[in-house]
Amino acid sequence: MSTLVGAELEAVRVFTERAAAELIRSGFPRVPAGVLMALTGSRQGRLSAAELRAVLQVSAAAISSAVGYLDQIGMITISTVPGTRRHSYFVGEDPWFTRIAATDTYRRSADAIRTAVLELPPASAGARRAGEMADFLTFCADRVPDLVQEWLAARSGNAD
């Protein structure tokens, strides 16, 4: 694993700050956005907790929470450094977007909302809004696999 120092550290730090800013404005949690962008901007797409702390200038606890969150939603992978108890975190060549598509988060959320909406009065505005939210999430769940395939085709130059 490389150690970020000097100009490389500063380049990744500036990239991370700029790239994470819009994610944060869109509602993505601040430290997870920084971790994701630091990993993305790093040479190998893999950094240790210490390297992430150097880039983001946050506590070890903040890094731990952020990588746990990103791992849970399928945006990064956590691995153990061979021969140590240390971890490294990475966005590898395995496209993270295919992992997101495979998690079926939209469909599970839609199903949960449809179950929870049964607690509301059927003709209420809240039930209507929740139903529309569930319908939209189902629509997204149905489209994500096709969008991933379209992206892969476009990226490889085989778009129809």
Image: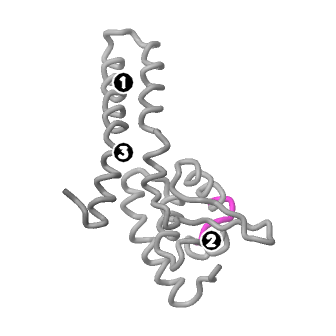
Please give the range of residues in magenta.
57-62
Residue at point 64% right, 60% down? Answer: 78
Query: Distance from label 2 to label 1 (Cα)?
Result: 40 Å
Residue at point 36% right, 24% down? Answer: 130
60 in the magenta segment: yes
In what element is the residue under mark 1? helix
In what element is the residue under mark 3? helix
Q: Can you identify the residue that label 3 sits on?
A: 145
Please say if 158 is above or below 55: above
Q: Can you identify the residue that label 2 sits on?
A: 53
Which mark is in front, 1 or 3?
A: 3
The amino acid pointed to by label 1 is Ala
130 relative to 59 in the view: left or right: left
Q: Can you identify the residue that label 1 sits on?
A: 130
110 in the magenta segment: no
The amino acid pointed to by label 2 is Arg
Q: Residue 80: horizontal and vertical position, in percent?
A: 72, 65
Which mark is in front, 2 or 3?
A: 3
Q: Residues within 10 Å of mark 2 (few under 14, many from 20)?
A: some
Quadrant of residue 131 within the rendered picture: top left
Q: Residues within 10 Å of mark 3 (few under 14, many from 20)?
A: some
Q: Residue 133: horizontal and vertical position, in percent?
A: 34, 29
